[in-house]
């Protein structure tokens, strides 16, 4: 798998920063449409190669490592006039150079490889370190978030230095790389700057809760975003406090970490969930969803020695992965998709590796096997591995981030490696947040910094908090392999099958005392008991003429301060869930999957849905057929080549008439489906929001074929395939499908005879997450074709919220953290109404065309697949 990703980067992308695996080319900043902050990691310094250096040695590819180091020394220029992220450049490039240097001197010492090496990577790291230092030119010592590699921050040509905010992780994830640079070179300034930034964040923590916020003003030290968690924006700050103690031996870092960890476990940890809270009111949840970056936290808990909650959170995350194949970028407390992307993040693999190291439980090898199978089955494409644009549909995004090579393969290889598979002892090193290796002997080298900051005060904590720091796993697990399983067992069905009732904080502290507070998702305006609870919380209810209900809170009218706080939380939930309901009225994206030779379903394109025609969410088999270009290409008049279009999926260009008119014309010509390709050259689903095709303002019930929309970039992939292979077969569906059974049987049979097969596909799994789609509103007839469902009245920010009193919807569908919104035996309640409607209305033909006989011979498939690796597609 690593070879497939690395060789394609080197062949198709190097010296560009990253590989674009769908189009088989390099991503060069400025030559591709801007992706916003994501592009700040790119600095025209061959990012992926530098990030991959020490992975090559971990995987015992010493010859390739030697060649890669020579390329970096010869080709990489760090003096580019380009603005980059200080955080990303530090962990990926500076960390990559230091990790490469660490393993290079280790190999040189062994005497076989790298005998010519004379610290060249360290010299480059020092050069880069000096280029990052201008970012620290602030009164607080917190760095600016961005720096120009050539001109610094305040230079007239720098084009940066106007920012006032940075994230806590951005400023607090420097100490390992900067201290290592100082220890390797004997130049103390780097470690001093990183320590000063950490000291400032520590001093600015919220003193009563001992939590830190997500973003901070770099000049004043004021918290800009006051929510706190262990995911995006804060994650690696906590990681680096503990690892700085491990690497540098400075007790103050451990004391700070333990102080924060006590607060995390007191407020944020709600096993198995980790939910953001407000730093000033830590008993108040700040959101009802979690982001995927918190998947690193179980691994950090293993390093801390707190195994039980690590097992619990990891198991919950694994259940989410089993439901969606990958960990969505964000998911709700009832485990539905909140943000659907998955850029092949390695944090869950990292925690899996650490838990296996701590427990020795072979269960975690099975987890690793699942990760590997899913990557090969859903993310592997001819030119590498493509990020998932939407885990619900299986559509791809044209990106393969450098961290995929730097971290994912490193942790997965180490998970399965025996000691004899390694050419060095991994225990002699600590992993940075980008999984780069820094040697532990640095703790006794070039110590120029005073270890204890005398001015810093620490909160006194119960000593039991420190009992299991740096644990001995033989003591924790004395011949009891069932220990971890006994912790996991209650969580086996937490996502899908059963809904064990959680215990609220009130019940936990008061036994069987007061009932938990009313949650927004449970509220019913017709329930007298709910109305009484609202009154107690200071929330008044107003019936509007249009049938909706308006909620207004006056805290002074609440029965007590605790009730007022409950009321505030209820209003915040209601506002957020009202907004969520509005979003859910939008149709989800669809998928166009190329299933013909030589693609075989590996290329999945994100498609926009239509508010007319066949509803693919209610037609699970999708529509499958060969594609044909229509004449005229715009589809705005009678089709002149009906013989070419009949029983095929018609390709046409956007523009010059309504989408519904195009659909009627191709349907009349005998087409079984249609794909509209954007006429805006260069448009892409990577950068543009989801596009929905609206009707023409008339009744569109006569349109029965499915219609999907592709942006220009995705459309060109199909058009290029037609030019290359002529007969191109696609599947239009609500989400990407596994190969059909005939192909699977052929694959399995040939895999027994062909040991060179790169990866074997699994039998189709049951649909993991069928999204419930709201009833489709009629389009407004505008020529742009974008259909906007009638929005809910927006809830204002002064605790005013709207709720629909329609008898069919008893309240928002969002679930609380403690009570998943399902009844016994029903894993997906949000689909009930929609599925009933689907059963009564669905009347389309579900027949799917069989795979052509061209796929009969697997050896031919292998040859075609190898050819594809060299092809522009």
Image (spheres, rainbow, N blue to C red):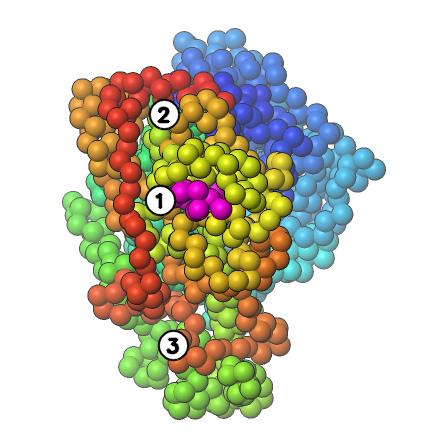
The quadrant in which residue 60 appears is top left
SS under mark 1: strand
**From mark 3 to mark 1, how far is it between C-alphas?**
32 Å
- Badge 3 vs badge 1, beta-carbon distance below 8 Å: no
Comparing marks 2 and 1, which lies closer to the viewer? 1
* 61 or 652: nearer the viewer: 652
- Mark 3 or mark 1: name the one nearer the start of the chain: 1
Comparing marks 3 and 1, which lies closer to the viewer? 1
- Mark 2 or mark 1: name the one nearer the start of the chain: 2
Q: Position of 652 compared to 32: left or right?
A: left
- Mark 3 or mark 2: name the one nearer the start of the chain: 2
- Where does label 1 land, which residue? 623
- Badge 3 vs badge 2, beta-carbon distance below 8 Å: no
- Identify the magenta region: 665-676
Image point (52%, 47%), residue name = 662
- Where does label 3 land, which residue? 808
Placement of 638 over or under 229, stated as above or below: above
Residue 769 inside the magenta-drawn segment: no
Tell me if I can see residue 56 in this picture: no
Image point (54%, 25%), residue name = 25
**From mark 3 to mark 2, how far is it between C-alphas?**
48 Å
Whole-percent x and y of residue 37?
A: 62, 43
Whole-percent x and y of residue 860?
A: 29, 18
Image point (53%, 77%), residue name = 802
Q: Residues within 10 Å of mark 1 (few under 14, many from 20)?
A: many
- Where does label 2 land, which residue? 598
């Amino acid at each position: 798998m690593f070879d497939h990703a690395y060789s394609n980067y080197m062949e198709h992308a190097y010296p560009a920063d990253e590989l674009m695996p769908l189009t088989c080319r390099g991503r060069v900043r400025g030559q591709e449409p801007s992706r916003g902050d994501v592009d700040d990691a790119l600095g025209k310094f061959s990012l992926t190669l530098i990030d991959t250096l020490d992975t090559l040695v971990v995987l015992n590819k010493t010859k390739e490592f030697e060649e890669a180091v020579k390329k970096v020394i010869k080709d990489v220029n760090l003096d580019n006039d380009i603005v980059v992220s200080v955080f990303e450049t530090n962990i990926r490039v500076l960390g990559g150079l230091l990790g490469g240097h660490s393993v290079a001197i280790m190999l040189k010492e062994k005497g076989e490889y790298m005998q010519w090496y004379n610290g060249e990577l360290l010299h480059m790291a020092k050069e880069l370190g000096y280029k990052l230092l201008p970012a620290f030119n602030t009164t607080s010592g917190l760095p600016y978030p961005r720096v120009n590699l050539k001109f610094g921050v305040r230079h007239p040509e720098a084009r940066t230095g106007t920012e006032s905010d940075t994230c806590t992780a951005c400023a607090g994830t420097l100490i390992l790389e900067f201290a290592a640079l100082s220890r390797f070179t004997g130049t103390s300034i780097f470690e001093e700057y990183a320590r000063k930034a950490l000291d400032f964040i520590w001093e600015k923590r919220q003193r009563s809760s001992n939590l830190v916020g997500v973003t901070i003003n770099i000049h004043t030290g004021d918290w800009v975003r006051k929510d706190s968690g262990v995911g995006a924006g804060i994650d690696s700050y906590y990681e680096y406090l503990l690892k700085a103690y491990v690497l540098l031996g400075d007790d103050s870092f451990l004391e700070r970490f333990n102080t924060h960890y006590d607060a995390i476990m007191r407020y944020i940890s709600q096993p198995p969930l980790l939910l953001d809270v407000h730093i000033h009111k830590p008993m108040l949840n700040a959101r009802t969803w979690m982001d995927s970056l918190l998947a690193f936290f179980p691994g950090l808990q293993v390093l801390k020695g707190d195994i039980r909650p690590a097992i619990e959170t990891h198991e919950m995350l694994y259940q989410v992965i089993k439901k969606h194949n990958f960990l969505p970028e964000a998911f709700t407390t009832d485990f539905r998709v909140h943000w659907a992307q998955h850029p092949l993040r390695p944090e869950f693999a990292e925690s899996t590796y650490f838990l296996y190291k701590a427990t020795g439980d072979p269960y975690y090898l099975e987890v690793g096997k699942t990760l590997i199978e899913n990557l090969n089955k859903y993310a592997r494409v001819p030119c590498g591995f493509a990020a998932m644009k939407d885990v619900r549909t299986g559509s791809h995004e044209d990106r393969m981030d450098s961290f995929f090579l730097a971290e994912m393969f490193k942790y997965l290889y180490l998970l399965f490696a025996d000691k004899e598979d390694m050419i060095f002892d991994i225990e002699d090193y600590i992993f940075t947040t980008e999984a780069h290796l820094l040697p532990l002997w640095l703790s006794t080298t070039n110590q120029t910094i005073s270890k204890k900051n005398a001015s810093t005060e620490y909160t006194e904590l119960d000593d039991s908090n420190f009992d299991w720091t740096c644990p001995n796993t033989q003591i924790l697990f004395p011949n009891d392999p069932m220990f971890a399983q006994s912790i996991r067992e209650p969580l086996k069905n937490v996502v899908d099958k059963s809904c064990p009732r959680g215990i609220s904080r009130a019940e936990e502290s008061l036994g069987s005392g007061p009932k938990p507070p009313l949650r927004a998702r449970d509220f019913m305006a017709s329930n007298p008991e709910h109305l009484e609870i609202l009154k107690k919380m200071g929330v008044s209810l107003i019936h509007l003429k249009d049938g909706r209900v308006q909620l207004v809170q006056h805290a002074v009218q609440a029965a007590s301060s605790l009730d007022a706080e409950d009321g505030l939380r209820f209003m915040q939930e209601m506002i957020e869930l009202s907004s969520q309901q509005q979003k859910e009225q939008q149709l989800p994206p669809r998928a166009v999957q190329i299933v013909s030779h030589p693609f075989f379903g590996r290329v999945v394109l994100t498609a926009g849905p239509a508010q007319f025609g066949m509803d693919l969410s209610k037609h699970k088999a999708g529509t499958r057929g060969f594609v044909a270009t229509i004449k005229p290409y715009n589809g705005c008049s009678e089709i002149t080549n009906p013989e070419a279009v009949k029983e095929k999926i018609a390709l046409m260009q956007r523009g010059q008439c309504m989408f519904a008119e195009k659909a009627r014309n191709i349907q009349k010509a005998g087409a079984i489906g249609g794909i509209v390709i954007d006429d805006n050259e260069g448009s892409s689903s990577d950068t543009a929001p989801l596009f929905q095709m609206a009707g023409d303002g008339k009744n569109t019930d006569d349109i029965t074929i499915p219609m999907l929309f592709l942006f220009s970039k995705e459309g060109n992939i199909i058009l290029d395939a037609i030019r290359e292979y002529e007969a191109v077969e696609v599947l239009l569906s609500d989400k990407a499908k596994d190969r059909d059974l005939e192909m699977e049987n052929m694959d399995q049979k040939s895999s027994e005879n062909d040991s060179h097969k790169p990866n074997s596909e699994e039998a189709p799994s049951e649909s993991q997450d069928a999204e419930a789609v709201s009833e489709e509103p009629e389009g407004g007839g505008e020529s742009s074709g974008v259909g906007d469902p009638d929005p809910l009245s927006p809830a204002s920010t002064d605790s005013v919220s709207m709720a629909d009193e329609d008898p069919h919807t008893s309240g928002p569908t969002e679930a609380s953290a403690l009570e998943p919104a399902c009844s016994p035996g029903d894993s997906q309640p949000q689909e009930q109404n929609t599925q009933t409607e689907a059963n009564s209305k669905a009347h389309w033909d579900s027949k799917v065309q069989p795979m052509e006989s061209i796929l009969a011979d697997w050896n031919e498939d292998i040859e075609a697949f190898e050819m594809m690796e060299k092809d522009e597609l």
